[in-house]
Structure formats: C-alpha cells, structure tokens
Image: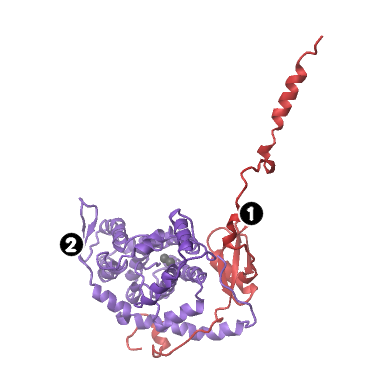
Amino acid sequence: MSNQSYDPRVNRLKLGNADDPIKVEEGENWNVYEVFHQEKRGAHHEHVGCVHAPDPQLALVFAKEQFGRRKKCVNLWVVRSADILAFDLEDEDMFANNLEKTYRDASGFKVMDKINKFKGEAVKPPKA
Amino acid sequence: MYGGGYIFDEPNKKQLREEQQHDDPEKLAIFEARISKGEKIEPGDWMPAEYRRQLTRLIEQHAHSEIIGALPEGTWITRAPGFKRKLALIAKVQDEIGHGQLLYNAAETLGKSREAMINDLLSGKSKYSNVFNYPAKTWADVTVIGFLIDAAAIVNQVANAKGSYGPYCRALERICYEESFHLKQGHDALISLATGTPMQKAMLQDALNRWWQPIMHFFGPPDKVSQHSEKLMQWRVKMASNDEMRNQFLDTYVPKLWELGLTLPDPLLHKNIETGRWEYTDPDWDLFFKVINGGGPCNQERLQVRRWAEEEGRWVRKALMNPKERRALPVA
Ligand SMILES: [Fe+2]
Ligand SMILES: [Fe+2]
C-alpha cells in the first residue's frame, strides 16, 4: 500500500494492489432464513427480519447475534425463506370483508334484549 | 451510521428513461395512488423499473456505508481509553455491521443478490458515504464520528424511515432505535474531552476542524446545483432535500458544540434569525466529487481492507456452502 494506515493492524497485513480483482461468486453468501422473535414466554413469535446462513443451526446462531442482542428475547425461530408460502399481494382484495358479517361477531347476538323482554313479560301479573 | 445523505448516481440514465416508458400506465397509476395514501410498497408488488433501480441504489449504498463506516472506528477498539469506552465502541461497531446486514437484506428483496452488491462495492462501481474516506487520526476523531456523523446519519435515517418501501422502513426502524445509543455514547465521549485537560480540549478542537468539511459534505451538494428529483420525492424514495437535512442537522447540533466552548472552522456559520435557516461558507464541492471518485485519503485503504476480508473469509464460506440448496430472496 502506498500510504501508511493509522491502524497498525492494517499496516501489518501488507495489503496488495488495490486492482487485484476478487469476485464473490453467487451463492457464496449462502441462503436466506426468515427470523421469528419471541419476546417473552406466552407471546407469539413475530417476524423480525432475516439472516444469511449455510444451514438452520448457524442461522439460529446468527439470528441470536442480529436480533437477540438488545431487546428482551426468550426464543427465536428460523425458517428457510424458500419454504415460506404466501398469498400473492395482488390477491389482497380476497380479504376484503363483507360488511354484513354480524353473524360472525359476538355483537351480532342480542341475548340481553331477549332476556329483558322475557322478564318484562313474566313479571306482569296474570290477568284475573 | 450511516445513511449517507448523498447517494451517488451512475452517469448513464438514458437507458432507464426508456425502461420507464415501458411501465404499464394503469399499474403506475395504482402504484402512485397507493403511495400518496401513505401505504407501503412490498417486495411482491408491481413497481416502476425506475423506482426499483433508485431504491436498490439507495439501500445498497446505505448498506455499504454501514460496513465501511465501521472501519475507521473499529481501528480504535484496541486503543480505546478505558474499559467502558472500549465496551461501548465494540457494541457500536457490532451494531453498524448489523445495520449493514439488515440493509443488504432489504436491498435483496428488490432482486439484486448480496454477492452482486459486494462485487460492485469492491470494484468501485457502487459507492458509500464519502465521510469514511477520511482517517480517524486520534481518539478525538472517534468521538466526533460517534457524535456528529451518527447525528447526521440519524437526521437522514429518520426521514427515510417514513419512505414508501416496506422492507427499508422496517430495517430503519430497528436501526434508528440503536442509533440513539450511538449518539449518546458519542456525545458522552466528546463531552469528556471538551471538559477535560487543555490537551484533551486541543485534541478535540483539532479533530473537529478536520471533520467539519466532510460533515458539511455529508448531505450532498446544495439544492441549487443537485438535479432535483420530483419523481423520487413523489414516490417517497427521497424524503427531504439535501439543504433541508443539512439545515436540520446544523440547527440541532451546532448549539451543542458551541455550548461546550468549541468552535467551528467557518466564520460565516450562523443562524439567520429572520429566515430561521443556517448560513455558512459553501464547502469545496470539487473536493467532494474528487473524494467520491477515489481521490480521498483513505479510499484505497478502505477497499483493500474490505477485499482482504472477502479473500481471507472465502475458505470458511466455501467450506460451509451447500451448493444443492434451493436459494431464495428474503421474503419481506
Ligand atoms: Fe448505523
Ligand atoms: Fe451508528
């Protein structure tokens, strides 16, 4: 290297010519794993991002470094990104709700109205 | 760090203009309506070719900046003054490498492989934030980087976190959370020198004098000369102009330097009370472009160290590689 570095470790490397071509091959940085983080016992595992790793075990190790080093964490899952099956984003409209869905909802069932009506009628004195 | 405010653009734009014309106008209208409603764009969504290209460039260069940015600071881990400063610096440098990983992943969702991005960095085709082409000469430089360069990066990253691309926003959310620690530990270390012995004060003042111009360069050329990109603003790729971000930075941080009795090497630097904007001597923009194009004091060293790491690490990566694996891009 023409200039001395302020870092003695860099000088010790005796780095060669900057024009030396090095080409990283496709696949050299391994595969992609999605990471799911559990903040506390009883909570869901939530997707937080991904890591590159050669296998699932190392993916867990890297996930711990990347996603478990600060905030609270009790567990992590990893899964190969290639194994995730998802709906096509263009099909988003299939999740659109029919507004008339009270039959699916607790609020769609007015039991108290019926009980009160029944009680109101029951306490009336029977006609002589 | 370090969403370098300035994102280097490759000179050839002609071909991309043509690509842009091939975007389906109906899909483009839906895409733009989605953004104007404040909705996020996700990897599987249709997007204009130019949006994909600009975002890839932006996120990739941001990722490179995180990785290269760790080099000048990493240099000082072995020589940090005291155990607490050493622990904080190790943690910060590890965070920066983590930021690089998060951002590479976000860029990959746009279709460019990790390997292609690293190759473009090593060959010099893809840039990183210009400030890292300057050396960290003394410990005071590390405090200036930790406080002011991280502060500048935060201004930029907080703005970008409100952008339109989902994976980038999610990465930035996590990054900004960690940056608050970087800023605080940098400020703390800088205050120690500023309130220390005359020698410590002089060392800090010297570092500040050397770093001031690169810091003024950080957000890129002034709005009056940089090609204004209406489209990128409309698509919420670029969230604020260079001058706006620089002004915001000066407004928050110059008073924090002055209150410590430090000076800045620009006699014109002051806030115009009437306009509310900061005025300053224009930094040397020719120098800025010279450094971006390889002419800075550390360009060569940074890339050589990065190449060395790729070469020396290769046998480990290869030994662990499983060529039969079905590879994929990150999902989100
Ligand atoms: Fe960072
Ligand atoms: Fe940082």
Residue furthest right in the image: A128
Q: CA distance from mark 2 to mark 1?
A: 56 Å
Callout 1, which amino acid?
Answer: Ala
Which amino acid does the dot numbered 2 rest on?
Answer: Leu
Quarter of the image where ligand 1 sits: bottom left
Say if B29 sits above or below B325 in the image: above
B193 and B141: which is toward the camera: B141
Residue position marked by numbered label 2 in the rendering: B268
Above or below residue B166? Residue A119 is above
State whether residue B79 appears in this view. Answer: no
Spot the red chain and give its letter.
Answer: A
Residue beneath the point at 51% across and 72% down: B108
Q: Position of residue A90 (x, y in %)?
A: 57, 61
Q: Horizontal placement of B317 versus B281: left or right?
A: right
Q: Quadrant of residue B187?
A: bottom left
**In the rendering, at what x and y percent does residue B48 appear?**
45, 67
Label tally: 2
The chain ID associated with circle 1 is A
| Chain to which the residue tagged by mark 2 belongs | B
Q: Secondary structure at mark 1?
A: loop
| Element on which disc 2 rests | loop
- Name the residue beneath numbered marker 1: A43
Pick the front one: B318 or A81: A81
Disc 1 Cβ-to-ligand 1 distance below 8 Å: no
Palette colour of chain B: purple
Q: Where is residue B235 shown, x and y percent of the image?
A: 41, 61
